[in-house]
Image (cartoon, rainbow, N blue to C red):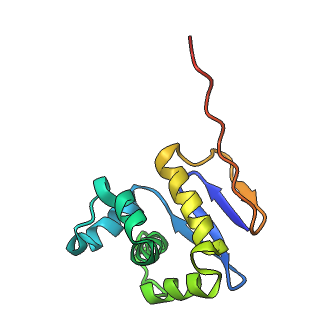
Amino acid sequence: MSIISKNKVEIKIDGKSKTFWLGMGAIGLYLDNVKKDDIVLDNLIERLQENPFSVVPRLMYYCYAYGFVRQGKNVDITPYIVSEWIDENGGLSGHIFQEFIAGFTASLTQGAPQEPTETPKGQPIKKAKKPGKQK
C-alpha cells in the first residue's frame, strides 16, 4: 500500500513506510548528482524509458535521500539498497517500482492529488480527475 500526497509518495518496504520526495528539491538533488550521465530535466523521461534499470533506482535513491539532506542528516542507505528493494519485491512489475513510478508520473504530469490517496497493494492508483473545460 502506498500513500501519494502533494509532493511525496510513501511506500511500505520490509514492513516500514519509506518516504520518497517528488518536489523540486528532490529532483534537483538527483539532477545535480547525475550530470556525468548527461541527464537533464529535458531528457529525464526519455532516459527513464530507455533504461529504467539504471535510472529508476538512482532516481528513487535521491528522492528518498532528499528527506535526510533537507534535515542535515546522513542518508541511511545506498543506491544499491534501492536496487535490492526493487529486485526483492517483484522487479519492474513489483509494487515498489510501480508505486514509485505512479507517484512520480503524477507529480510531473498533473500534480499529485491534493488529498492523500491510499491504494491497496497491487491495485492501480486512481488518476486525479481533470477539471472540466471552461467556457
The C terminus lies in quadrant:
top right
For the question of whether residue 78 can be seen, the reply is: no
Instruction: Give the image location of residue 94, x and y in percent.
Output: 64, 75
- Horizontal arrangement in the rendering, residue 113 relative to residue 111 (left or right): right
Instruction: Name the residue nearer the viewer: 91 or 110.
Output: 91
Residue drawn at x 30%, y 65% as measured from the top left: 31
* Left or right: 59 as drawn, with respect to 32: right
Q: Total of numbered circles in the picture?
A: 0
- The quarter holding residue 12 reads bottom right
Q: Position of residue 5 (x, y in %)?
A: 62, 54
Residue 57 is at least partly visible in this image: yes
Which residue is rendered at x = 63% and y = 44% of the image? Answer: 114
Quadrant where the N terminus is found in the figure: bottom right
121 or 31: nearer the viewer: 121
Q: Quadrant of residue 52?
A: bottom left
Residue furthest toward the top?
Answer: 135
Q: Give the x, y percent position of residue 51.
A: 39, 72
* Left/right of residue 118 with respect to residue 25 in the rendered view: right
In the depicted structure, whether residue 20 falls above or below residue 80: above
Judging depth in this view, the residue of 63 and 94 nearest the camera is 94
Which residue appears at 38% of the width and 61% of the height?
27
Q: Which residue is painted at 44% across and 83% down in the image?
A: 75
Residue 110 image offset from top left, x and y in percent: 52, 43
In this picture, residue 45 sits left or right of residue 20: left
Residue farthest to the front? 50
Q: Is 25 placed above or below 95 here?
A: above
